[in-house]
Amino acid sequence: MREGFRQSLKRYNELIKDGRKIETEDPKPNNLTSVINHELQRTANARANSVETQKNVFELQKRKQAIMEELHSRLRAIDHLGAADFEPYKERTGKSRDVGIINGQLQVLENGKWNKISLGELLTDGDWGIDYLLDDRTIPRDIHKRFVVEEAKRKLQDLLDRQIVIDEISSSRIDESKRAAYTGMAEEKLDRKIKDWRTGQFAELLVQNLLKRMSIDMEAVFEILPADAYQDVNEKVDFIVRRKTRDRGVRVETHEKSRITSDKKIGIQFTINMDPAVLKRKEEQVKKARRRMHDTELTDILLVSMPADNIRQLLKTWGKKNEPHGGPISFLDRQSQRNIIGNILKHIFDGDEILTLLDSVIPRKKKMGTA
């Protein structure tokens, strides 16, 4: 997001916290309302939009603050698992699926049957709208905490994107082509269910989800970060890969062939459109974004293209099978998963590293006659 907008949200957050404090500690009349109105007007002037726009942004910030407060409350509840006065941090919903440790394995109850589920699936299936209810008697606290944090992050990211879209669309300074891009994002993605997304948007989520799951399940040296709406439109980035440092108390040899070094972030512009003219246009967009990269947190921006034949069918098959854990990826064959991951990571790791990563999570099928 724009740095100025980031600072505006920070000021809004402070005002919201001040308001909550006054409500609980000082029943006397106060001038906080006038302070808020002044800040809304000041921000509207700075962003070249209206006070009404900033009111909408402010209300969304209140919702984000409420999510953070709920998260802290849930984390405190998890710390008291097993205590006599323990109260569940999450209520069951009609679509919640029970998750527990059964026979020493993480398992989910679906259609009356317990099925093995990986930690990566548990923490990322929320991307597909799957809701889990963890058994506080068997699930370790650290897994509980990671789960509720991931839930909160998804909600916060959605609200942040909505704030950015509202603010950018309403600004009189924005380029009309970018205004159209933000409008399209709101109409085609933020306000629609996944099943109604365009194929390219669905493919992008599928790839991100697969990479996130893999990075968790193998405790990889990289992580997948979402790109916000501003990064998507202005920096031509769909998601970000960050390579992390493993600190084991000894010097770790680095690979000279790696495209990025430890703790660096690389933006990925992903497309399934293989038309040469489209790819050329996107390459030019990425080149322009690279030239402006000094204003961002990114080390590099790469265009990654790959065909996505029949990828839409995965979503349909998943729905027909009652949407089992793992999301639509569950119906993507092993070799296709390897191809997708390899196509992304080849820009970041060398060949040997990629094979090691892939073989540890998605083993190759053994040939007939081999041991």
Image (cartoon, rainbow, N blue to C red):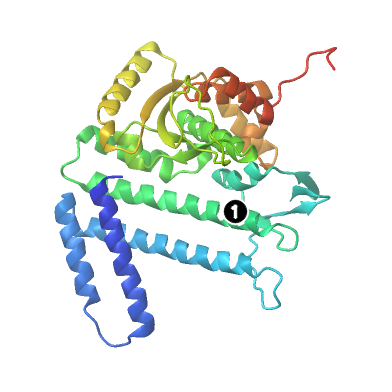
Does residue 104 appear to the left or right of 129 in the view shown? right
Please give the name of the residue rendered at 58% of the width and 34% of the height, measured from the top-left corner: 210
Q: Is residue 297 above or below residue 148?
A: above
Does residue 271 appear to the left or right of 314 in the view shown? left
Does residue 203 appear to the left or right of 136 in the view shown? left
Q: Secondary structure at mark 1?
A: helix
Q: Is residue 129 above or below residue 22?
A: above
The part of the image, by quadrant, that contains residue 50 is: bottom left
Give the image location of residue 201, x and y in percent.
46, 33
Residue 28 seen anywhere in this rendered image of the structure: yes
Residue tagged 1: 147
**Dot 1, how many residues are within 10 Å of its Cα: few (below 14), some (14-19), or many (20+)?**
some
Q: Is residue 316 above or below residue 88?
A: above
Please give the name of the residue rendered at 62% of the width and 35% of the height, measured from the top-left corner: 328
Residue 95 seen anywhere in this rendered image of the structure: no
Give the image location of residue 340, x and y in percent.
56, 24
Of residues 336 and 182, the one nearer the viewer is: 336
